[in-house]
Image (cartoon, rainbow, N blue to C red):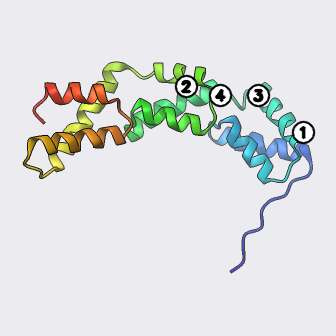
Amino acid sequence: MDQPKSIKITDEKVALAKAEHFCAYQERAQQEVRDKLYEWGLWPDAVEHIISQLIEGNFLNEERFARIYAKSKFNQKAWGRIKIKQGLKLKRIPDVLIKKALLNIDLDDYLASLTHLLQKKAATLTEKNQLKRRYKLQQYAMGRGFEAELILDILKDSEL
C-alpha cells in the first residue's frame, strides 16, 4: 500500500497562510502549530517567525485556548479538573494559564456534573456489597479526573 505523501512547504508565506487557516479552523495550542509546521518541513527559524506572526495576528492565543479547552472538556466530556489539567500539560500550556482556565469552571456546575456522573454510573452497577459499590463509583469518578475528596463527600451525602 502506498503511504500518503507528507506535505513539504519551503516558502514561508505559503506556510503562514496555511498556518493561519489551520488556526482559524479551531483553537490551537502553540505546540500543536509548531509540530504541524515542523511536519511540513520548515526550518526552526521559519517556524518561530511564523508562530510570532500568528500570535501578533491573534490567530494563536494560549490563554484563550486553555479557557476553551477546559470549558469544552468539562461540558462535553464531563472531565474533572485533574484530567483537564493533564490534557493542558500535554499541550504544553504554562501552569499559570492552566490555573486561570480551571478557575473558569463554576463550582456548582462542577459538583452537579460529578453528582450526575455518579448517579448515572450507580444505575449501571449490579454490585450488591455496599463497600465494593462505593469503591467502584469512586474509581470511576477518579478515572474521569475528579478529586477524591469531592467524590467522597458526594458519596457520603447521597445514597448511591
Q: Amino acid at mark 2?
A: Ile
Taking 78 as reference, is 2 left or right? right
Mark-to-mark CA distance, 4 and 2: 10 Å
Q: Earlier in the sequence, mark 4 or mark 3?
A: 3
Q: Mark number for residue 98?
A: 2
Q: Amino acid at mark 4?
A: Glu
Mark 4 vs 2: CB contact within 8 A: no
Taking 159 as reference, is 83 left or right? right
Q: Mark number for residue 45?
A: 1
76 and 83: which one is in front? 83
Q: Earlier in the sequence, mark 4 or mark 2?
A: 4
Q: Amino acid at mark 3?
A: Ile
Mark 4 vs 3: CB contact within 8 A: no
- Give the labeled residue for mark 4: 62
Q: Earlier in the sequence, mark 1 or mark 2?
A: 1
- The secondary structure type at the circle numbered 3 is helix
Taking 20 as reference, is 146 left or right? left
Mark 3 vs 2: CB contact within 8 A: no
Q: Earlier in the sequence, mark 4 or mark 1?
A: 1
**Which residue appears at 77% of the width and 43% of the height?**
19
Q: Earlier in the sequence, mark 1 or mark 3?
A: 1
- Of marks 4 and 1, the one in the foreground: 1
Name of the residue lying farthest toward the right: 11
Estimate the x, y position of residue 64 in percent, counting from the top left: 61, 26
Mark-to-mark CA distance, 1 and 2: 28 Å
**Which residue appears at 69% of the width and 39% of the height?**
31
- Of marks 1 and 3, the one in the foreground: 1
Taking 116 as reference, is 3 left or right? right
43 and 27: which one is in front? 43
Mark-to-mark CA distance, 1 and 3: 16 Å
